[in-house]
Image (spheres, rainbow, N blue to C red):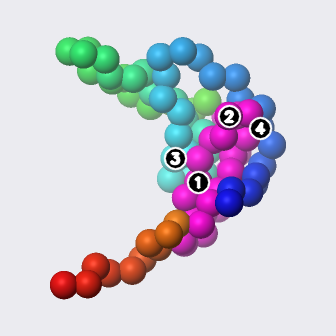
Amino acid sequence: MAEMIQKVGLKREKGFLYFIDKAGDISCAVMARGKKKGGKAKKAVKVGITKEKGYLYFIDKKGNVSRAIMKNSGKKKKK
């Protein structure tokens, strides 16, 4: 189950990929389509989230930052 971390209300533009970068801010880049290469990432919104280990951080449908527990967080594969 996902929980909302911070309310942002981001309005997305078509053709861009939105993600949370290492600094904890929301960044966007032009999506690669066919033979076109993707663009360089730029900051969309400065949020400043500190990420905790074992969680997957994402931008939900409403444009807010949410997180969910990773099922396989840090476990090694059995041989």
Distance between the alpha carbons at the discs numbered 2 and 1: 13 Å
Is the residue marked by circle 3 packed among few (<14), some (14-19), or many (20+) residues within 10 Å?
some
Q: Is residue 62 above or below residue 74?
A: above
Sequence-first disc among 3 and 4: 4
> In percent of the image, x 74 and y 33: which residue is there?
62
Q: Who comes first in sequence, dot 2 or dot 3?
A: 3
Residue 71 percent coordinates (x, y): 50, 69
Q: Which residue is mark 4?
A: 8
Quarter of the image with the N terminus is: bottom right
Q: Which residue is tagged 2?
A: 61
Amino acid at circle 2: Lys
Residue position for label 3: 21
The three-letter amino acid code for the residue at tag 1 is: Tyr
- What is the spatial separation of the Cα atoms under label 2 and label 3, in whole angstroms? 18 Å
In the foreground, 78 or 26: 78
* Distance (Cα) linking label 3 and label 4: 15 Å
Which amino acid does the dot numbered 3 rest on?
Asp
Magenta extent: 45-69
Where's the C terminus, which quadrant?
Answer: bottom left
Measured Cα–Cα span from mark 4 to mark 2:
11 Å
